[in-house]
Image: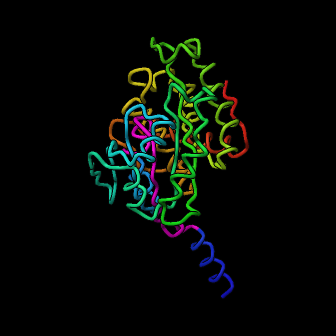
């Protein structure tokens, strides 16, 4: 009898944890589009979880512009929403309406990529968070910061000049600015996409971007989605069996490892990857 009970207990420990339903809203731009609008739902589904994903999208949108739009109730957003794995898009939507659309379990914020390492550009972050909280279903709705990635080293753009056209310098500026600015806004949780992309670059080379800024449609976006999946669900993404057909099993494993390592590093306050 003892053997049967022991065996039953062992088998139960092998069963997956009960699935979670998580509703997350990204208030962002094309960098949140890269991270959440593809692969993320499928990764979570593969491990038994269900996500409702919202993305309040304006290309290149900054903290300051989000704040101005919210104060003015400007219908300036494309609202992309993934439910049941199907993405719908709604044009000319106010941020207030997007925030009120669901009982969001988490709301994420981020800075426009070229400003992500410029401390003075974060001045309105506390006010933006406070204003958003007025329209959430609960004033206790948690927030997280989406840490974006440094540009590809070979990018030739005015946006890169503030960082002397140097990926390492941009990455370091993103880290220091983020760590300096988030406490004043009361944001403690960080989704370390920027770390994951940098780690993936060590595995694949500097090929994770399609245009120097945005992530590649395959390895780049998949790595970011893996990072979000582990952050949101709390389940180790390394070993997840989902990946698109455009990515091999070996490539998927490397992306998953980069994402898991990024989560591990961030949770321990480690950001040095050079």
Q: Is residue 174 left or right of residue 50?
A: right
Q: Is residue 75 left or right of residue 254?
A: left
Q: Residue at x 28, y 45 (%)?
A: 92
Q: Toward which corner of the image does residue 219 lie, by quadrant? A: top left
* Residue 221, x across and y down, in percent: 42, 36
Residue projecting furthest to the front: 72
Q: Is residue 46 above or below residue 124?
A: below
Highlighted magenta segment, given as a residue range = 14-39
Q: Is residue 41 left or right of residue 234?
A: left
In which quadrant will I find the C terminus?
top right
Residue projecting furthest to the bottom: 1
- Marker count (numbered): 0
In which quadrant will I find the N terminus?
bottom right
- State the residue in front, 78 or 85: 78
- State the residue in front, 13 or 31: 31
Q: Is residue 210 above or below residue 95?
A: above
* Residue 182, x across and y down, in percent: 65, 42
Q: Toward which corner of the image does residue 60 lie, by quadrant? A: top left
Q: Is residue 223 left or right of residue 266?
A: left
Q: Is residue 200 above or below residue 24?
A: above
* Residue 51, x across and y down, in percent: 42, 58
- State the residue in front, 142 or 41: 142
* Residue 176, x across and y down, in percent: 69, 30
Q: Residue at x 33, y 42 (%)?
A: 76
Residue 233 forms part of the magenta stretch? no
Q: Residue at x 58, y 11 (%)?
A: 164
Q: Residue at x 61, y 45 (%)?
A: 126
Residue 37 forms part of the magenta stretch? yes
- State the residue in front, 140 or 174: 140
């Amino acid at each position: 009898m003892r053997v049967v009970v022991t065996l039953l207990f062992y088998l139960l420990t092998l069963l997956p944890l009960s699935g979670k339903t998580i509703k997350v809203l990204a208030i962002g731009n094309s960098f949140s589009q890269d991270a959440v609008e593809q692969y993320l739902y499928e990764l979570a589904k593969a491990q038994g979880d269900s996500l409702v994903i919202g993305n309040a999208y304006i290309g290149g949108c900054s903290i300051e512009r989000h704040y101005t739009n919210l104060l003015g109730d400007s219908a300036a957003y494309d609202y992309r929403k993934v439910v049941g794995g199907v993405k719908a898009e709604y044009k000319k939507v106010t941020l207030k309406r997007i925030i009120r659309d669901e009982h969001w379990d988490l709301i994420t914020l981020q800075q426009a990529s070229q400003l992500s390492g410029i401390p003075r550009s974060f001045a309105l972050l506390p006010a933006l968070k406070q204003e958003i909280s007025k329209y959430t279903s609960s004033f206790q709705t948690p927030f997280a910061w989406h840490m974006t990635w440094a540009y590809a080293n070979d990018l030739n753009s005015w946006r890169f000049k503030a960082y002397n056209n140097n990926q390492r310098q941009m990455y370091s500026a993103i880290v220091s600015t983020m760590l300096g600015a988030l406490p004043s806004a009361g944001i403690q949780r960080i989704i370390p996409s920027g770390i994951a992309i940098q780690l993936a670059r060590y595995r694949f080379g500097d090929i994770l971007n399609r245009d120097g800024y945005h992530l590649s449609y395959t390895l780049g976006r998949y790595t970011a989605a893996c990072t979000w999946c582990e952050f949101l669900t709390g389940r180790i993404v390394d070993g997840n069996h989902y990946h698109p057909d455009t990515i091999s099993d070996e490539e998927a494993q490397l992306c998953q490892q980069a994402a898991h390592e990024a989560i591990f590093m961030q949770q321990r306050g480690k950001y040095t990857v050079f």
